[in-house]
Image: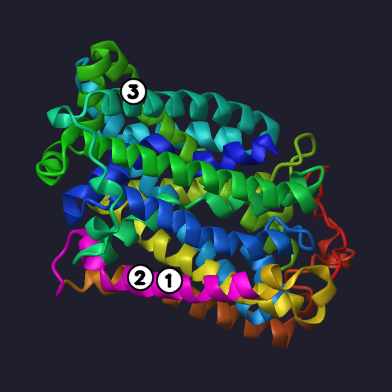
Amino acid sequence: MIHLVFFTVAASAPLTVLGGGVTTTFAVSGVMGVPLSFLLMAAALALFAVGYAAMSRHVGNAGAFYSYLAQGLGPRWAVAGSFVALVAYIAIGVGLYGLFGESLADLAMRVGLDLPWWSFALLALLASGTLGVLRVDLNAGVLAVLLVAECAVVAIYDLGAIAHPVGGEISFTGLDPAALFVPGVGAVLAFTVAGFIGFESSAIYSEECRNPRVTVGRATFAALAFTGLFYGLSAWAMTVSVGTAGLQQAAAKNGPGLVFSGLAQHWGAAVADIASVLFLTSVFAAIVSFHNGVARYLFALGRERVLFSAFARVGAGSGGPVVGSAAQSVLVLVAVLLCALFQVEPVLELFTWGSGLSAVGIVVLMAGTSAAVIGFFRSRRDSANSWQRLVAPAVATVLLVAIVILLIANFDLMLAVSPSDPLRWIVPGVVLAAALAGLARAERLRGRHPRAYRMIGQIALEPDPEESAIEYGPKLRRHRHSR
């Protein structure tokens, strides 16, 4: 289970969330209740995780949301959801390359190395692509080292911040509901949910677990509890150290530097320098995690002929989704080169757009999955209690739909554009376009390949004759699921 926890927490990237997400939320919204928002969002997502975990005992598929939607709502919605998932994970993955490239370029500039951001992004792509074709155990080991180091830095920041409160007195304003439920709360929730993206990814690795019926659910709850409490504590520590009166101005001026300056002040310049490096490894850890997620989605969709069957090929020795990983690398390569060609700003545009698009897509998928849990257990009432199969998923569906509405309503703030800017509708509109494309693909499959359509999200028992050349390794494989 520990490997799954590393993947899911690494995707959320604690140091990236603190240095990038939390500071940006304070700077944009001016709302001081950000710490409380993390705790409340974690509670809301825990309701989603109840049904998600219960269904994971019956569904084990590298397509995760895709297979859940298939067995709860039907093939048509599964394909639509899979297209949304691919767009969401690819978007945030590409955005992270922008953040990584720009951050490393700034660091390199300090030592006299002046190279464009995209050159460093391509180095990260080479590294993540290599890891993507290796065993999941090796990837988890790499992520473990990076994750432990960055969490240690965040914990050190928290200790220093709380031990040195502004004015000499610890303030609990950040945990006061009155400081959260003010104008701008929608923007806060929009940024907050983006910080949790990745916690749901444990199901992607269900076919590579020894006991997925137990492991996936436990890993999901463990990752959610850890990130929710850790983010809430760290955001509160920032309000204590900087003070609520000048926090918005300080966050807007310094961004991630607000964290590094705090570390330098309380622990010395050497610690701040180490944190700057670990900020990069935090972003890279998230890149690796999302790279693996996309590769496994492509594997699942190729295996069931929703996409090209070649995506179902895996490494003979590692069992990893080799073709899916390679395809993800090619997509990122094209995206980075296009952004470099058209001079897209890597952080304020590429990273922000990717994060916003991904946030909408993932929350839409979670809302659909919660509804799918209810549909799945409708004929399996004895497989879960009423809280797991009905009450929690129903409440989660309502809450998640409300969050989607808030996200879209506040998208101008999230993208830092004017309310009249068409970009605020274009970016979330990509999610709708992906869903419609998925529905169209499902209809095409139903008409031309009815057998493949019926097996969507179920994993076919045996490959068709024309699929006989597909290699299935020891890790990712075909097998029957109870349904």
| Callout 1 crowding tier (Cα within 10 Å): few <14, some 14–19, many ≥20 | many
Q: Position of residue 96 (x, y in %)?
A: 38, 44
Look at the numbered discs 2 and 1 and tell me whether their residues touch, using CB distance below 8 Å: yes
Kindly report the distance in space between the C-alpha atoms of the residues bearing marks 3 and 2: 33 Å
Amino acid tagged 2: Pro
The quarter of the picture where residue 253 lies is: top left
What residue sits right under mark 1 in the picture? 431
The answer to which of 340 and 350 lies nearer the viewer is 350
Q: Indicate whether residue 411 is drawn in magenta.
A: yes
Image quadrant in which you'd find residue 271? top left
Name the amino acid type tagged 1: Val
Q: CA distance from mark 3 to mark 1?
A: 35 Å
| Residue visible at 53% across and 70% down in the picture | 396
Query: Secondary structure beneath disc 3?
Result: helix
Most foreground residue, 226 or 13: 226
Q: Residue at x 82, y 69 (%)?
A: 383
Q: Is residue 223 visible?
A: yes
Left or right, 406 with reference to 455: left
Q: Mark 3 or mark 1: which comes first in sequence?
A: 3
Q: In x, y percent, where is residue 1?
A: 70, 39
> Which amino acid, by three-letter code, is at mark 3?
Ala
Is residue 161 positioned above or below 343 on the image?
above
**Residue that badge 2 annotates:** 428
308 relative to 385 in the view: left or right = left
Question: Height in image: 107 above or below 354?
Answer: above
> Which one is in front in this view, the residue at disc 3 or the one at disc 1?
3
Q: Is residue 324 visible?
A: no
Q: Which residue is mark 3?
A: 275
Specify the segment rendered in magenta: 391-420
Q: Main secondary structure of the magenta part?
A: helix
